[in-house]
Image: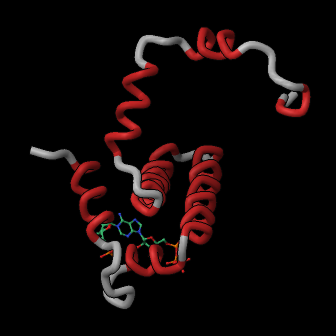
C-alpha cells in the first residue's frame, strides 16, 4: 500500500495536461515553472512565520502546503519522489558536519558569514 506522500505525488503528476478550471494543480502547471517556484517560496515563508509563532501546531498546515507545492515543482521538472528518496538514501549515515568538511573551502562570495 502506498503512503500519503506517494498518493499525493501520483495525483499531482496525473494533473499535467488536465483542465486548469477543474484542477488547481493543473492551473499551476499551466502557469509554468516560475510561478510554481514562486508559490513554493511563499509557502516556505508562511512555514517560517508559523515556526516563529507561539503555537507549533500552526506549522503543520503550512508544512503540508509546502510539501504539496514541492511535489508540483518536482513533477513539473520531470522528477519524482524516488529521486529525492535516492538522494536522501545516499546521504544516510553521513553527518552534516562531515559532509560540509568534505566539501573543502568555498570561494568567499559563497559564504553566508
Ligand atoms: N494538497 C493539496 C493542496 N495543498 C494546498 N493546495 C492549494 O494550494 C493553494 C494555495 O493557496 P494560496 O492561498 O497560497 O493560493 P491561491 O491564492 O489560492 O492561489 P494562487 O492564485 O496564489 O496560485 C490553495 O488553492 C490550496 O487549496 C492544494 N491543492 C491540492 N492538493 C492535493 O492535490 C490534489 C489534486 O488537487 P486538484 O489538482 O486541485 O484537483 C488534491 O486532491 C489534494 O490531495
* Viewer-side residue, 63 vs 86: 86
The residue depicted at 34 percent of the width and 79 percent of the height is 17
Please state the quadrant of the image where ligand 1 appears: bottom left
The residue depicted at 39 percent of the width and 59 percent of the height is 75
Question: Residue pushed farthest left?
Answer: 1
* Residue 43 can be seen, yes or no: yes
Question: Residue pushed farthest right?
Answer: 108
Q: Quadrant of the C terminus?
A: top right
* Residue 61 can be seen, yes or no: no
From the viewer's perspective, tell me whether residue 20 is left or right of residue 37.
Answer: left
From the viewer's perspective, tell me whether residue 18 is left or right of residue 66.
Answer: left
The residue depicted at 46 percent of the width and 50 percent of the height is 63
Instruction: Check the image and report above or below for 8 versus 23.
Output: above
Instruction: Check the image and report above or below for 38 versus 5.
Output: below
* Viewer-side residue, 17 vs 70: 17
* Viewer-side residue, 53 vs 34: 34
The residue depicted at 37 percent of the width and 24 percent of the height is 89
Question: Residue pushed farthest bottom?
Answer: 21
Instruction: List x then y, in percent, for residue 36.
Output: 54, 67
Question: Residue pushed farthest front?
Answer: 78
Instruction: List x then y, in percent, for residue 55.
Output: 53, 47
Instruction: List x then y, in percent, for residue 9.
Output: 30, 56
Q: Quadrant of the N terminus?
A: top left
The answer to which quarter of the image holds residue 98 is top right
From the viewer's perspective, tell me whether residue 74 is left or right of residue 22.
Answer: right
Instruction: List x then y, in percent, for residue 50.
Output: 58, 51
Amino acid at each position: 500500500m502506498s503512503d500519503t506522500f506517494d498518493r499525493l505525488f501520483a495525483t499531482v503528476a496525473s494533473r499535467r495536461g488536465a483542465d486548469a478550471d477543474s484542477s488547481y494543480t493543473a492551473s499551476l502547471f499551466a502557469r509554468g515553472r516560475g510561478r510554481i517556484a514562486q508559490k513554493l517560496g511563499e509557502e516556505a515563508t508562511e512555514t517560517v512565520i508559523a515556526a516563529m509563532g507561539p503555537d507549533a501546531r500552526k506549522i503543520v498546515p503550512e508544512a503540508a502546503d509546502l510539501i504539496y507545492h514541492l511535489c508540483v515543482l518536482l513533477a513539473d521538472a520531470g522528477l519524482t519522489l524516488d529521486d529525492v528518496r535516492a538522494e536522501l538514501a545516499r546521504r544516510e549515515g553521513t553527518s552534516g558536519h562531515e559532509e560540509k568538511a568534505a566539501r573543502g573551502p568555498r570561494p568567499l562570495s559563497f559564504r553566508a558569514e
